[in-house]
Amino acid sequence: MLKRKVLLAMIMAVTMLISLMVPAKASTVSGMNVMVNNQRVVSNVPTAYSNGVVMIPAKEFASLLGGSFTYDSASMTGVIRQGENELSFRLDNSLAKFNGKYIQAPAPMQIINYRFMLPAEFVAGKLGAEVYTSLSKNLLMVFQSIEGKIIYQVMGGDSFWTISQLFGTSISTLKELNRLTSDVLYIGQKLIIKDFTPFVEVIAAQTTNNATLRSGAGFGFSPLAYVQAWTNISVVGKAGDWYKVTTPKGNGYMHYSIVGVKQDINDTAANSMYFSNSIPVDTSADFITYTSYTVQKGDTLWSISEKVGLPEYELRAANNLTSTSVLYIGQVLRVPVHNIPVKAKLAPQFGELLDWFKQAQYVFPIGKEAKLIDLETGRSFMVKRTMGGNHSDTETLTAADTQIMKEIFGGSWTWNRRSFILETDGRRLAVSVAGMPHAGIDGLPYLQNVSNRSDNWGYGPNYDRISGNGMDGHFDVYFLNSLRHKDNKMDSVHQYNVMVSSGLE
């Protein structure tokens, strides 16, 4: 019995020691909190894990590290810029690029919980910080050099012993660095942990042409020296289009176009297909109830489906009808009613992220009016959904609304797509809008065959339902997972824009 108690005590001691001091990359606790320089990272989404790597919202993490995060949708590249360092990731690509050099990352930039997420420890390390993890506090802590030192702020439950174990130092060293003699600590007390000078990574490169070395990052700065082509140089930083370099003729800045960074690996991967595929949303709270409709004189399956806000195929299926079925006056049809509860938004300024086919087409049915709000400018105009199955075919209500829409898109009609919020029935929904009216002529009867339909649609039915609004035809409003009419495929730009409207950043 005594041996068993001793063994149990040893196991408990080892377990406690491991929980207090463990490398960051070994953590497996979900929902880990992150602090940068003793300040908690606050975000509208929590941290996550990808193959055991702590992933953190890019925007907030970059900001607390003293930098910024931007995403370029054309190249699908996210970039953190901090001082004279640049760290970039392509979406879903495990290679990163630090100051122009490709390196392997422990996890790619990913979209998790509809936010761009980056590997926290890797990013912090490349940008000159140190990372420590306390599993007992479920906390990943990032420290930058503050006046050449790492400073830790005491938290509840801390003691000299737990702090020394966390940072791999001794109690005597902590007391000596902070000129302390007492064992008493108080919450919020700042302790010097150690001296810390960030490591400056030196990257081998060469000039690819005769090069001008300048005193600053820009053509307006004075020349310091001229360096011949194919001269070996070293990159020690990057500021936008300019590399910070050391050369045989001194230190300064060179434009990226004449600097060839020596690569050990290359990025040959294709772009991510994330925005070209269907993006899942939570539909678990949605439910269907049923009501009825009594057929009246002049009704058709199409006209009834518009009245009740359903696609015609769904109304047919609910009543075991076909496209050739004959309706009779007084016939009672069973009508599904889709109940789509309001979904949480990432922030008040953003919109709910609704799947078009499963949710949004029922919240914004044909005949429904709404306000469209441009996410960038805040300008708005009124619209109505007039038709459309794969997405919302939409028209402005008045000529004044048409003018506002045209101004938002730069003063002329264009197939360019923008992020918008659609407001209807007190809800804010994430959408993307293309600024090109098409397939109709204002002032002529709906569905009458006409010539010269807008946007070179030629002869055919007039798909313009609202007369006198100064818009020829209708324009496209996409929700998440809407499809193009021409090929029944996703539009990756619309998908991205909808995500931005819902809070992707």
Image: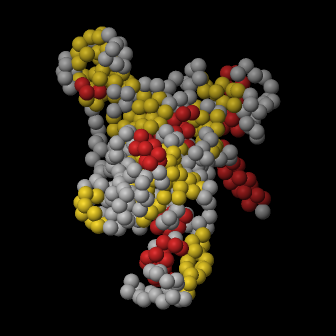
Residue at x-position 48% and y-position 40%? 376
Whether residue 22 appears in this view of the structure is no
Whether residue 486 appears in this view of the structure is yes
Q: Nearer the viewer, residue 502 or 244?
A: 502
Q: Quadrant of residue 245?
A: top left
Q: Which of 44 and 473 is in front in this view?
A: 473
Residue 95's spot in the image, x, y percent?
36, 44
Residue 337's spot in the image, x, y percent?
58, 74
Q: How does the figure colour the protein chain or chains?
A: secondary structure
Residue 327's spot in the image, x, y percent?
46, 87
Q: Is residue 214 left or right of residue 134?
A: left
Q: Identify the image quadrant of the N terminus.
A: bottom right
Q: Is residue 156 left or right of residue 208?
A: right
Residue at x-position 60% and y-position 79%? 290
Q: Nearer the viewer, residue 239 or 164?
A: 239
Residue at x-position 33% and y-position 14%? 220
